[in-house]
Amino acid sequence: MRKKVLGLLVLVFFPLLLAACGGESSSGGSSSSSTTGTVSALKVAEKVSVVDAKESTSSGIVSKIKPLKIGITKLSPSDLPSNSDYFKDETFVYVEERSIDAFNIVNEILCALAQTKYDEMLNKGTYKAQIDINQCSTNNDDVSNAGQQSLNQTSGSTMPDYEMWIVNSSRADNNSPQIVKAWIHEESDGAEPEKMIFVKMTITEGVSATNPYGIFTLNFKAHPVVNGEVDTSTELFKGYLKSEKDESNGKILLKFICNGNFDTPEGTIEFDKRVTLDRAIDGSSGAGTIYSKDTFPGPNGSQTEEIQFNIAFNTQYFRRVSANDDVCLSRTSFDETAWRYGLYDSNGNRVNRNSGFPIKITQNGKDYYGWIGYWGLWFPEDVTVNNGDTVYKLSYGPGGGTETPYTVFISNGRLIKHTKKTLKLGDIKNVPLQYHEFDPNIGTDSEYRVEWNGTNFVKVARLNKNTWMWENISPPQPLTFGEDDYSFDFWSDALGGSGHIDLRDPNTGQLITLNNNVEVIFHIEDLVYPSDTVPSTLVCFEDCPDPTKITTNDPYYDTSNYQYQNVPPANAQKISYSFDLNKMVLQKDGQDIVLTTTNNTYPWGIRSGPLFEPTAENLNKLACDWDPNSTCAWQAWNKLDVFYTWETGPNEWNKFTALKDSNNDFLTFDPPLPVEYVHTWNDGTTTKFYLEYSGFGELHGIPGKCIDIDTGEEESCDETSRWVPEFSIPNGSEVTDATNGTKYLVKALEKEQRMKVVNSSYCSSLTVTTYDLPTIDEWIDPDIGPAPEVSGPPAVIGGVVQQ
């Protein structure tokens, strides 16, 4: 429960949280200052690590000696120019440790502030910054979130989530402190009230090689917004973060406090987080105290969880002491996980995606600023954009810009094209596959994680639908197939979606013996645009949406008798649809098939089964292998080279949203790039993964696992576990574009290290001390006044200054 409360608190402070923050690294080469005119800007850390990371053998740049190449040519970093993006982009490495969870909130604040580019915007006046809160989200390692996302098998899981900030960064001269002010207006969200957050940061010294934090004080507070007015008489939370230098010994003292409370329908949540860290300026040693107290509603009334850690460390070891344990960790022996990656082409240039751009809309005489891209449309919550509205693409910079008008086109659904690809079962050894199993005897269904171990399929975990956590099955249970099984159908993020394996011999109809050479079928997905060609008629045999039942808990036609029919496919019963390219909507007898409100049974949206053109060639592929005069409709999933699915729902990712220019032509955006990666395991065996690259830093599809928060050992998931990627891709590894074979290189942009537990005797020389913790009495009201009115578009979007 403690981990859940911490995550909730973080959502209250800044709904922008990720223990792995986006943007460029703070310790990897960000300079302490940049020059704007005659005044130099100061910059503080973008992330705080209590202890510094150690160099690892896997993170270094490969040798400059060029290897002898025989046969197939492979990309290598040694072939790239030394001034290429591959070498200039540095990897930010930090240390993750249980006692410093309180720093999650600190790092969310620093990450979000870094996205405002307050250093580059120094003395350029008050401006808007559009913050992508997904870049600073703490949900990456949340095991419950991972379980729920595994059931979200529609599109949109990597969609950016923007929030508008008002920012001012100023410095009178190079002898004066730099002042950064921020006003953050947050809409209400469930039980959380609408609020205004006020932030003031005073920087007197920027980060440097001898001071990785900088010297600064950051005070913040939040007030509710009632009927459009900020209620300054009520505080939701307040606190401060500061770093101080002890000139007598050169140490850096870091202090953090945040406390407050808010009401939920279940009761009141109260929180109190405090940290004091006494750290040598070079990071070689240090000590501190971390305190956390959370009060929250429980099934039997209010519950309180309180914990305090005292820590001490040197260059070799880290000691953590609480009321219940005394743990010694090695600073030189650790596990490592990469959270973010970049892709680079054969010249070492970053691979970017045309995923979208900023736009403006004017309503009731007021300008609103948002974003449009492959995943849809984003505007502040009080803005409704309708089909046919005019918006403006913004091209701008500090010196001004241009606005280009476009017409918004919105369809309440998306047609997705699926193109068949194949692998061998041996290629996906150890890849987690999600498998749905229904037990008719007891009327329950279950979600399992299944893996091919080289000989058999085994169930390795089961999803607990009460906690949304994967619970390990130990020992793994064999997955057996019987006379009622004709195929094995699954979902896998590591393969980019759904997959299929035939279990029957096409000649005899008998169950086959599974081996590494059995074919695995999966599909590459592409979004259909109005400029594409779509068959005039599409037919469906399975999960065929019924427009008259679309809002019910059973929104499909009853096609249970369509799966096997004792007639040739050309004569088989099926549901026919048409697709209107002008409206971009699937229709049944002229009736649109769209879901515009939330269907509680399908909160992620509704998706059809295969829709395909009823050509003789396609229909013949549905003929049963053992009887060409019978129809086996389920073969559409695996035998058709191309089919479509229709997705509809109220979420932005369920819709097709595009812009039309003055010539009535549609603009297109790049979908996530599917890439093939071959991973080599410790035993020398290999596995193919199909990952999705949404843009710089966003490589998705690596399977995850649960680890113990104290030891870092893999465990069955529970509410105290962390969810981390099962493996990291070594720098310099090659991936292949699954659509055209282009090769790219991979480099980790952000890694965490987890120190390993060692015998307590190694920490005998480390003495822990209970430090004085900061008190709220030391907090200073930011006192920056009400949020100023700022006209024009945002000058910074997602950490990028608009040029």
Image (cartoon, helix red, strand yellow):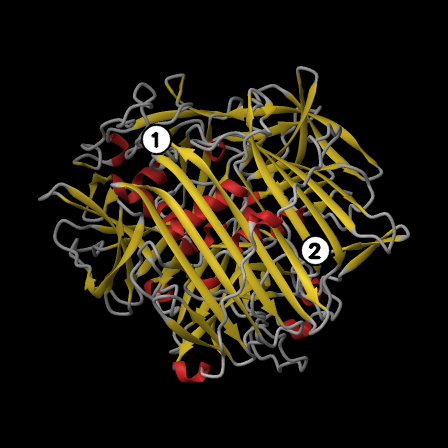
Looking at the image, is mark 2 or mark 1 nearer the viewer? 2
| Label 2 sits on residue | 216
Give the label on residue 669, or none: none
- Give the x, y percent position of residue 498: 36, 48
The span from disc 2 to disc 1 (Cα, nearest Å) is 64 Å
SS label for mark 1: strand
- Pointer 2 or 1: first along the chain: 2
- Give the x, y percent position of residue 420: 41, 49
Look at the picture and state if 774 lies above or below 599: below
Look at the picture and state if 770 lies above or below 506: below
Q: Nearer the viewer, residue 768 or 661?
A: 768
Residue depicted at 62% across the width and 50% down the height? 778
Whether residue 241 sits left or right of residue 593 in the image: it is right
Residue 19 in view: no
Residue 651 in view: yes
SS label for mark 2: strand
Q: Dot 1: few (<14), some (14–19), or many (≥20) neighbours within 10 Å?
A: many
- Give the x, y percent position of residue 113: 65, 48
Look at the picture and state if 156 lies above or below 38: above
Q: Nearer the viewer, residue 542 or 689?
A: 689
Whether residue 529 sits left or right of residue 489 in the image: it is right
Q: Specify the amino acid type for callout 2.
A: Phe
Q: Dot 2: few (<14), some (14–19), or many (≥20) neighbours within 10 Å?
A: many
- Give the x, y percent position of residue 294: 41, 48
Q: Nearer the viewer, residue 582 or 791?
A: 791
State the count of labels.
2
Q: Specify the amino acid type for callout 1.
A: Val
Q: Quadrant of the C terminus?
A: top right
Q: Nearer the viewer, residue 181 or 112?
A: 181
Give the label on residue 539, or none: 1
